[in-house]
Amino acid sequence: MQLTKELANLTREQLYEKVWSTPGITLAAEFGLSDVAIAKRCKKLEVPRPSRGYWAKLQAGRKPRRVPLPPTQEETFTRLAEKEPARKKLPRADEASLGPLAAEFLAALKKCKNKWDSRIHLKEPSWPEVTVSPALAERCAQAFHVILQGTDGVGLPFRKSRSSYEGGVFRLGHDQLFFVIEEELVAAPERTTGRGRRPAYSAYGENRVPCGSLTFTINSSRYGRDTVKQWREGKDGALEDVLVKVVSGIRSYFVQSRKKRVQDAIDQERRRLEAEERHREYEKKRAIEEEAKRRERHAKAVRKVVRTRRDDLLKAAEWWRLQQGALEFIADCERQWMSAQDGQLDPDQLAWLKWARETATTLSPTACGYPDPAKDGPVEMGSIPFGGPYPETRKFTRPPTMPKISKPTVVKQGYYGETTPTPQTYPFWLKNQRS
């Protein structure tokens, strides 16, 4: 069930006051939701709810204890992570002084072999990505131990990477941070051969040596394209001071990331509610338009009934006029034949007169029961129910003497298809007048 806008806009404190001041059934009716939906909202916002029997004790005049509103996990993490980490001394480089993870990390460093640049390269899912000389392996493990002490205390564990092609990460929820320790290469003192000359050829990297200090880098992406921060021993202070900055930087990254996620969730919920509000407004507007269309169709149907009955009256009158004219014509024919034949008619003339009178009788609208006040009388607009059924109509055939009014011929032109009447032809006699 979707949340209502009123419930979604409540803060934790406001929801806490609502839950502890109003029974669940009453609160559910107020928001138009079920008590299960309100319970889910409380669970999501980490708001405690009254236990069973709380409202009975309250009605009995007792004062049951309210469970105070605890801080959320986000608030607890933010409070701990925003504290300035303490400066700690480097431990001894042995298994007894190092933590379990740092000791295993040191053992992994010692197993690595030197590469062409006189450094060891460690890139395994369980450890940070490391590129240092063998002389700084123990120092690297000591620094990692101090960093772990500063992050584990606030709930930022160092986890194994999900990929076998990258180093371990600091992970919290869906956020992760890649950690790299490196000893950079610097230019080596120039070597000369006899009589102060340089060697003719040298391999790549032969004139670069490890600098003897550590550089710590945190990246938010796998390949280091989004470097968050970087600290260098010596340039940014002694190693103990640099480690304080590293721990503070890792904490700050996750604090900002969590705040951003919370804000994004709030914005997403706000956008969802705005979209629902727009949809409701659209449905309301559409319902109004549909109602207007239905009323227009109803009015059009009523007008059609009125127009049809009016046309039927004109058609019936025209058919009656045609019948009267036909009867007068038949009577005139009979008089002429009788005067010409001394009052006697032959069988063919009698047969024709019989057929003509029968045919003229069918032309009368009274032959089909017209007019009937119930079917052919006036139409009261208020008596017709909305949407029908509508009164019956006869729909007489148009008499041949009644001309049919043709609709004006129109042509489409213009980009939007405007319609205009067909222009009248210029009269030839007016165009070619004689002087």
Image (tube, rainbow, N blue to C red):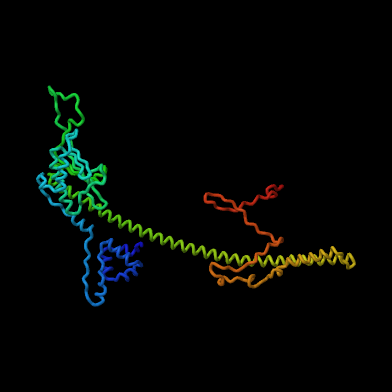
Q: Is residue 242 visible to us here?
A: no
**Residue 68 placed where, x, y %?**
21, 66
- Taking the image as shown, residue 312 lies to the left or right of residue 36, namely right
Q: How many marks?
A: 0
- Taking the image as shown, residue 323 lies to the left or right of residue 385, namely right
Q: Nearer the viewer, residue 60 or 433?
A: 60
Vertical side of 347 occupied by 206: above or below: above
Q: Residue extending furthest bottom?
A: 60
**Residue 149 placed where, x, y %?**
15, 50
Q: Residue extending furthest top?
A: 195
Q: Quadrant of the N terminus?
A: bottom left
Q: Quadrant of residue 182?
A: top left
**Residue 100 placed where, x, y %?**
15, 48
Vertical side of 222 occupied by 31: above or below: below
Q: Nearer the viewer, residue 292 or 85?
A: 85
Vertical side of 59 occupied by 428: above or below: above
Q: Quadrant of residue 390?
A: bottom right
Q: Nearer the viewer, residue 224 or 163?
A: 163
Q: Quadrant of residue 124?
A: top left
**Residue 323 placed where, x, y %?**
75, 66
Q: Nearer the viewer, residue 250 or 131?
A: 131
Q: Measuring 57% from the left and 68% from the top, which residue is drawn there?
A: 389
Q: Measuring 17% from the left and 47% from the top, which residue is drawn there?
A: 246
Q: Is residue 216 visible to us here?
A: yes
- Taking the image as shown, residue 101 lies to the left or right of residue 272, namely left
